Structures are given as structure tokens and as C-alpha cells.
Image (cartoon, helix red, strand yellow):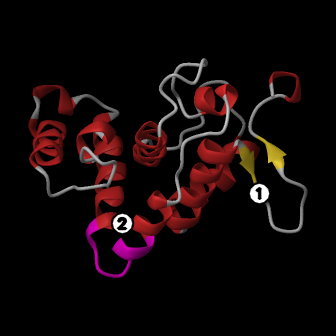
Amino acid sequence: MATAALDSSGVVDFKGDGAKEALADLDYHPSSLLTPTPILDEQVQSVVGLFTEEHSAKDAALIMKAATAPANKVAGGIAGKDSDGAEGTQKAVREAVLAAMMTPMTQGPVGSCFATAPARKQQREAPLDYMRGLTEIASKRTFIVPGQPNIPAAPAETI
């Protein structure tokens, strides 16, 4: 879905043919009846809304524009691409951020609600801030908490 939503220059375009086809597949493919699909569909549709609704489209586009190619191999890996950074292009980073935005935040069988609850809340209630955080992690390999030291997005020994 994230790949289909980006045009050839890395700009989010949910009105393009690829995105329309991917959204239709998500909504109407027989496998969409599987249990997790409605939650995924809801999350994808909320991200589509961020980029298409008047009150948020400009801010969402600006945040995505700030997603830049990582400065090193480790950041390329954090962006979900090859750890050698071969795919660490600006478009690849934007795809990683968009894919993360479309992924419903869940705890999983061994997760901790203390870790996931704040992230889930931010994803639902402040999605533009959530996207800014993902962009920061993918582009600069840090997570910034106001008033706190920057938090590396990878163990220090790998940076």
C-alpha cells in the first residue's frame, strides 16, 4: 500500500491509479474478510484522510517532505531497507514512514501495555505528531522527546 501511494518522485498521491487499485484490493479482496484486515483497513483509511482532508493535507505533506534519506547505513536499516543503505533513498524513507503510519499499533502476545499504550494513543489522537516522530527516526535515527536528551533509534554499539 505504501509503495502504491507514492508517485515516482516520492510524493504521497492517494488519487493515483496505483493507490486507488491498492485501496480497492484492501477493501474488496476476499482475504479482506480475515480478522486483522478491518483494523488494518481502518488505519489505512485514517492515513488516507490525513493526506486528503483539507484540515490536515498540507501538514501531512510537509511532514512527509521532511523525510529525507538517512545519513548512514544504520539509519537505512532503521528505515526498513537493506542494512547496507543501498535502498536508503529519500523515496525509500518516505515509503517506510508511510508504511509505519498505515500499520496499526498493537501490543502483540509478549508486549507491554506500558510501552504500547502511549504510542497507540498518539497514533489515534495526534497522528501528525506520530508521523513527525516516525520521520525523525527514519531520517535521523533519533527520537526527540521535548525537554529530554535525544534517544537513539538503534543500540549505540551499532551506530
Residue on which the image places disc 2: 50
Q: Distance between the residues labelled 1 and 2?
A: 22 Å
Residue on which the image places disc 1: 144
Residue 65 in the image, given as x and y percentages of width and height: 45, 60
Question: Disc 1 vs disc 2: Cβ atoms closer than 8 Å?
Answer: no
Residue at 45% of width from left, 68% of height from top? 62
Q: Would you say 6 lies left or right of 90 here?
A: left
Quadrant where the C terminus is found in the figure: top right
Q: Would you say 110 lies left or right of 37 here?
A: right
Residue 83 in the image, given as x and y percentages of width and height: 60, 19
Q: Would you say 75 lies left or right of 11 here?
A: right
Q: Nearer the viewer, residue 125 or 62?
A: 62
Task: Report the span colored magenta.
Answer: 52-59
Q: What element carries label 2?
A: helix
Q: Would you say 71 lies left or right of 32 here?
A: right
Q: Nearer the viewer, residue 80 or 42?
A: 80
